[in-house]
Image: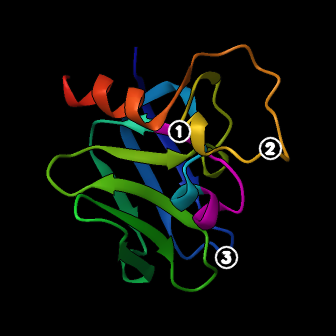
Amino acid sequence: MPVARGRGQCLCGAVTLVAHGLGQHVDACHCRMCRTWAGGPLFAVECDGDVTFQGEEHVSVYDSSEWAQRGFCSRCGTHLFYRLKDKPWYAIPAGLLEDQALTLRQQIFIDEKPAYYELANDTPRLTGEEFLAKYASS
């Protein structure tokens, strides 16, 4: 059940976002691209509603693949979102959001997780292939 809205702000305060249709679960992505971007697994909350920005002139967008973009604050570098290009779906970094009652739902791209860390949470662990097959059929 989605939360009505979530709010977050970058480190320097230049960008504030409000996400409508925000989920209540966090997914941990261990893919190489997310680990490179985040410095570790990306802990993100899905949002399938509108996301609005104040300070949008400070939002920089990087086309990280043919189907997705990553956004960040151009002043302080705070990661703001991962989003799909073809539909209104965002992954908002969980640490960006103001306090929410969130739980870790699953770990994805577990086959790309390096050996130097292990999450203790007992969650489903999907390989990249399993994750893509599950959501491609949705």
| Location of mark 2 (residue) | 115
Distance of label 1 from label 3 (alpha carbons): 31 Å
CA gap, disc 1 to disc 2?
Answer: 13 Å
Residue at 71%, 54% (x, y): give it: 40
> Alpha-carbon neighbours of circle 3 within 10 Å: few (<14), some, or many (≥20)?
few
Which one is nearer the viewer's eye here, 86 or 80? Answer: 86
Which of the two discs, 1 and 2, sits closer to the camera? 2
Instruction: Please say whether residue 107 is one of the residues in the magenta stretch.
Output: no
Rendering coords of residue 42 (x, y %): 61, 48
Does the segment drawn in magenta span residue 36? yes
Residue linked to disc 1: 109
Report whether 35 appears left or right of 63.
Answer: right
Sooner in the amino-acid sequence: mark 2 or mark 3: 3
Residue 43 in view of the camera: no
Check disc 3 and give the amino acid type. Answer: Cys
Residue under the image location 65 percent in, 16 percent down: 123
Residues under numbered marks 1 and 3 in contact, where contact means CB atoms less than 8 Å apart? no
Q: Secondary structure at mark 2?
A: loop
What's the amino acid at mark 1? Phe
Amino acid bearing label 2: Ala
Q: Which residues are magenta?
A: 35-45
Question: Where does label 3 land, which residue?
Answer: 12
Q: Is residue 137 visible?
A: yes
